[in-house]
């Protein structure tokens, strides 16, 4: 289970920064914190008022070890126009908790358990406990690829509910959905018009903020070929980055080995990447999954379209200059034109 949400009264080590060190953004104490969210990239803090939780005004940048303001500015998410510009008037129930819990009840404002527990991905488990059998539990591995991927896309995507809820509130997660139902009945992915840069997308349609993995993935060739999220990830946990089943290059090259019909079609990986073996430039994810989608400040997560973004494409960071930041896009495009296996018709002008 992903322990993103923790109660610091039960887990005193949950709060990462030292709250005794003064900072102008730090206007609360440990006694104000009812729940913490996150520990890998950022950590956010929530206080309880009545039967709701509300975000406190600062978040901890884990990588850079600094405090940053936490407030969702108007126009930076679809729901901001429906909620006052005040953290204490933006409860986490409608905006966060449905994805960070099992069975969030919008009437009772209660959960079966916090975090992504078993039933989030496998559905109700009481019958399975009573009669352990593959017939009494949902296994996403036995579902068709659309419904299997929707198990993850329900939360790893930017979108909005397909229909209004009875309480008239605006929810940023698919209220009423559970595994085994049809996600599109409850959720629609954020639209994008080619050429427009929005709070969710770059101009070419690639996501530029966190929680866009699903939006990206459904546009990929991999998705249309029936690849699933768990073809690469094991949500139960591994020792590899991002809970990958195997180290990234090992995983990619299982299907994309040299001279493979899936590509690359060169004799060696070095001929394909034009970088030394085992170097960062020879990693599949460096070019096909660049870190361009913001999670906090200068900390980005990887895109999931798997498309190579050519340096001639404007309005989106390209795969070359993401690493070669001291060079120009023109330099990168000129370099690609010297690579015999790269079609000039794909590079553009």
Image (cartoon, rainbow, N blue to C red):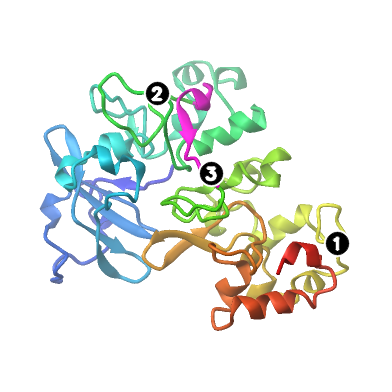
Dot label at residue 215: 3
Q: Which residue is mark 1?
A: 265
Q: Secondary structure at mark 3?
A: helix
Q: Nearer the viewer, residue 185 or 329?
A: 329
- Residue at 46% across / 63% down in the picture? 300
The number of callouts visible is 3
Q: Earlier in the sequence, mark 3 or mark 1?
A: 3
Q: Nearer the viewer, residue 108 or 88?
A: 88
Is residue 319 visible in the rendered image? The answer is: yes
Labels 1 & 2 near each other (Cβ < 8 A): no
Real-space CA distance between mark 3 and mark 1, rounded to the nearest whole angstrom? 28 Å
Real-space CA distance between mark 3 and mark 2, rounded to the nearest whole angstrom? 19 Å
User: Is residue 190 found inside the magenta-colored segment of the image?
Assistant: yes
Q: Which residue is mark 2?
A: 163
Q: Position of residue 232 (x, y in %)?
A: 64, 48
From this view, report whether residue 316 is shown above or below residue 55.
below
Q: Position of residue 5 (x, y in %)?
A: 32, 45
Q: Is residue 259 left or right of residue 147?
A: right
Q: Nearer the viewer, residue 94 or 72?
A: 72
In the image as oriented, which residue stretches furthest toward the bottom? 326
Magenta segment:
179-193
- For disc 1, the neighbor class at 10 Å (few under 14, some 14 to 19, many from 20) is some
- For disc 2, the neighbor class at 10 Å (few under 14, some 14 to 19, many from 20) is few
């Amino acid at each position: 289970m992903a322990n993103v949400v923790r109660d610091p009264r039960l887990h005193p080590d949950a709060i990462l920064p030292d709250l005794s060190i003064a900072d102008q953004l730090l206007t609360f104490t440990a006694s104000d914190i009812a729940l913490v969210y996150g520990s890998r990239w950022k950590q956010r803090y929530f206080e309880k008022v009545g039967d709701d939780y509300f975000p406190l005004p600062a978040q901890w940048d884990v990588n850079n070890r600094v405090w940053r303001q936490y407030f969702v500015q108007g126009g930076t998410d679809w729901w901001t126009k429906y909620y006052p510009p005040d953290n204490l008037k933006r409860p986490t129930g409608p905006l966060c908790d449905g994805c960070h819990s099992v069975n969030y009840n919008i009437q009772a404002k209660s959960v079966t358990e916090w975090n992504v527990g078993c039933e989030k991905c496998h559905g109700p488990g009481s019958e399975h406990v009573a009669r352990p059998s593959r017939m009494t539990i949902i296994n996403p591995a036995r579902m068709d690829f659309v419904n299997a991927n929707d198990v993850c896309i329900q939360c790893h995507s930017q979108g909005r509910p397909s229909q209004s809820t009875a309480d008239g509130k605006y929810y940023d997660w698919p209220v009423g959905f559970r595994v085994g139902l049809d996600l599109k009945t409850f959720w629609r992915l954020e639209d994008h018009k080619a050429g427009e840069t929005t709070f969710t997308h770059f101009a070419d349609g690639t996501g530029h903020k966190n929680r866009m993995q699903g939006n990206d993935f459904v546009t990929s060739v991999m998705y249309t070929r029936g690849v699933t999220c768990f073809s690469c990830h094991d949500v139960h946990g591994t020792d590899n980055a991002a809970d990958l089943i195997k180290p990234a290059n090992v995983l990619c090259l299982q299907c994309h080995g040299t001279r493979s019909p899936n590509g690359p079609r060169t004799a060696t990986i070095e001929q394909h990447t034009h970088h030394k073996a085992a170097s960062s430039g020879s990693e599949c994810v460096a070019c096909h999954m660049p870190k361009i989608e913001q999670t906090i400040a200068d900390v980005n997560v990887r895109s999931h379209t798997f498309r190579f973004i050519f340096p001639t494409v404007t309005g989106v960071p390209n795969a070359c200059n993401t690493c070669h930041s001291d060079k120009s896009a023109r330099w990168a495009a000129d370099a690609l034109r010297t690579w015999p296996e790269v079609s000039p018709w794909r590079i553009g002008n």
